[in-house]
Amino acid sequence: MFFSHLTLFPPACKVTVLMPGRTFLGVLAAALVGGALAGAGDQRDRSLPPRPATPPNVLLIVVDTLRADHLGSYGYERDTSPYLDGLARAGTRFVSARAPSSWTGASVASLLTGLSPIEHGLEHHNSFLPDAQETMPEAFQNAGYETVAFSANPAFVTPEMGFAQGFDRFDVLHGKHVSRNTPGDVHWGDASMLTLVEVATAQRVTETAIAWLAERSTDRPFLAYLHYFDPHAGYYPPSAFAERFGVPADEPLRGPSQKQFVYRHMRDVSGTTAPELETLVALYDAEIAFTDLQIGRVLLETMARKIGPTVIIVTSDHGEEFGEHGGLQHSRTLFEELVHVPLIISGAGVPGNATVEVPASLLDVWPLLADLTGVPAPPHLRSQSLHELVYDPPPRPPFFADLAVSWGIHTSAVIADSSKLIVDLEGSASLYDLTEDPEERRDAARHSPARADALSAAIRTRRAHARTSPTHNVKGRFVLTPKRRARLEALGYLE
């Protein structure tokens, strides 16, 4: 039995695991493609099976703050993601998928509406997704699906932010109460803001999802949304994973000083050392590896329960910076380390061992799910065919991204062919050739003014069109109360 290749552990146990061997991953891929999750062949076989006779389940997994280039299937040299790599081999990997913003709220709203941040209304940290917007979960709920969400992001992926629309059940998960000086991801807990509550780990998300699968008493298909948080700063992986990635127990950045270090250098890493940045990256990679294991447990559970044909999507809301452009974390720029995210689709009706080379974004996910499940998306969204994207990709329109956050940053970006322009609200623009300069180090705006002007015009035209489109919604705004401000500060979103 191939499940013996993984040591699973009950909720009360310490995290001691055996990492999966390649034999296990081969069996996992085969099971996803040909077994309980009923996928399709590989990229050499251009035929696809018909859509399943019964509506397929959908497992939509978002790993907060996950860079594409830190997964093995996207070329990373560290072994951070054996389960996700197996899932990619069993399905279709999008090589150039991007998030439409570099902070969670705007990107997740785009994922669930198929609209850009300037259309759906959730642009700023103190705004929320208006009820008037139609969401993917609402469409699946109206089609008879059971819809559930388990979120470990207590700041933005919450009912308060408007994300419960269309979900029969929406759980915002938390960890235990801890003292102020406890290392780890925390947010303010009580009304007096004296107690901290740990953010739920990947293990908690997985165990909640597995318990829900065990308790299900309906034959209805489901849409399950899992939002993991672990790769988000602070980076406090379980000890076994930190040490596996070379960070010893006595490393100061594994303790409370990590938070002060990250806050101090969010905008300027010039005072850091190479070993300090390497330690942060190692801890981040360890968080990815731990999350990957927990996702593997969910995949095993879905196979063991023989739940029927299922489409699995794994992606992220944004990436993370480690000094590439002078800072740390995210939600400050639109460079590739923050907008290039993984997008892996596997399971029912999905080509196996396939890649999509043309650019894609989180806005494509809902139309692709409509193609794979038969649950219609709204007519204002561009239809997408996964088969076409794999085998006969059409020309793709330019990709746009937007960043508008509460500390005064307002930036837009456009990518057309290999050119990328980033422009701020004052009109300052930087132009990059992603083929010649993938790390975005050399601003070519002065050398190619005509190209920069054309892309700037595209941003202005698109913004004007978005503001007048029928799907545009005036953003709802929160009053930024002291409690909400403290919660955002605890998670690193405000300074």
Image (spheres, rainbow, N blue to C red):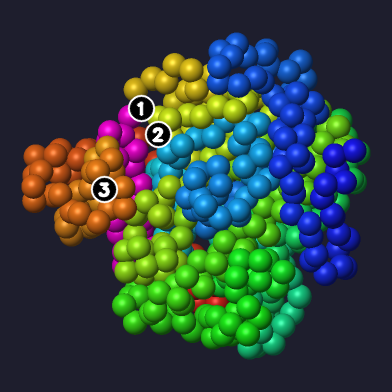
Q: Which residue is mark 3?
A: 437
The relative height of residue 330 versus residue 269 in the rendered view (above or below) is: above
Mark 3 is surrounded, within 10 Å at the Cα level, by few (under 14), some (14 to 19) or many (20 or more) other residues, namely some
Is residue 334 found left or right of 385 in the rendered image? left
Residue 362 lies, in percent from the top left, at 49, 40
Q: Which residue is mark 2?
A: 359
> First in sequence: mark 1 or mark 2?
2
Residue 144 lies, in percent from the top left, at 75, 29
Is residue 26 found left or right of 130 in the rendered image? right
Circle 3 SS class: loop
Q: Nearer the viewer, mark 3 or mark 2?
A: 3
Q: Which residue is mark 1?
A: 396
Q: Is residue 128 visible?
A: no
Mark 1 is surrounded, within 10 Å at the Cα level, by few (under 14), some (14 to 19) or many (20 or more) other residues, namely few
Q: Nearer the viewer, mark 3 or mark 1?
A: 3
> First in sequence: mark 3 or mark 1?
1
Circle 1 SS class: loop
Which residue is rendered at x = 80% and y = 42% of the image?
300
Image quadrant containing the C terminus: bottom left
Image quadrant containing the N terminus: top right
Residue 114 lies, in percent from the top left, at 49, 37
Q: Which residues are magenta?
A: 396-417
Is there CB contact under 8 Å for labels 1 and 2?
A: yes
Between the residue at mark 3 and the residue at mark 2, the CA separation in whole angstroms equals: 17 Å
The relative height of residue 170 versus residue 321 in the rendered view (above or below) is: above
